[in-house]
Image (cartoon, rainbow, N blue to C red):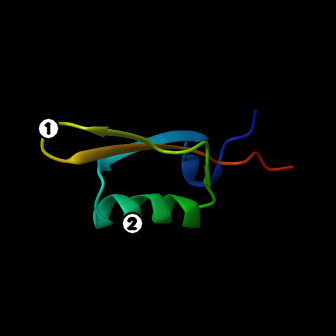
């Protein structure tokens, strides 16, 4: 088994309100080499839209 650079996990799920900060967090993960894993899950908590996005970091050859 290989360890991702910087000891980052291969799999992550980011969650939070659907706002610019959440989009920045996903963008930062993509810049680190993560790839989207499926589409986002979206729900409404009675006040705001909440999003979850799974990300995978590809294995190195």
Nearer-N-terminus badge (1/2): 2
Which residue occupies 51% across, 58% down?
29
Q: From the image, state whether disc 1 or disc 2 is nearer to you.
A: 1
- Horizontally, residue 54 falls left or right of residue 45, namely right
Q: Nearer the viewer, residue 10 or 19?
A: 19
Q: 53 or 1, which is in the foreground?
A: 53
Q: Is residue 22 above or below residue 43?
A: below
- Identify the image quadrant of residue 10: top right
3D distance between C-alphas at marks 1 and 2: 24 Å
- Give the numbered dot on residue 35: none
The percent coordinates of residue 17 (x first, y second) are: 26, 50
Q: Is residue 16 left or right of residue 46?
A: right
- In this view of the protein, which residue sits in the foreground, 2 or 26? 26
Q: Percent from the top left, x then y, of residue 60? A: 79, 50
Which quadrant of the view contains residue 22?
bottom left
Q: How many marks are shown on the rendered structure?
A: 2
Q: Is residue 38 left or right of residue 26?
A: right
**Label annotation for residue 46:** 1
Query: What kind of element bears circle 1?
Result: loop
**Residue 45 at x, y percent in the picture:** 19, 36
Residue 24 numbered mark, or none? 2
Q: Is residue 12 above or below residue 31?
A: above
The x, y position of residue 12, in whole percent, is 50, 41
- Marks 1 and 2: CB-CB under 8 Å? no
Taking 43 as reference, is 12 left or right?
A: right
Residue occupying the point 61% across, 43% down: 37
Label 1 crowd bin: few (<14), some (14–19), many (20+), radius 10 Å: few
Q: Circle 2 — which element?
A: helix
């Amino acid at each position: 088994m290989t360890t991702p650079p910087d000891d980052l996990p291969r799999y992550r799920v980011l969650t939070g309100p659907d706002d610019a900060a959440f989009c920045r967090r996903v963008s930062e993960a993509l810049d680190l080499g993560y790839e989207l894993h499926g589409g986002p899950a979206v729900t409404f908590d009675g006040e705001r839209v909440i999003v979850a996005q799974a990300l995978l970091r590809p294995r190195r050859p």
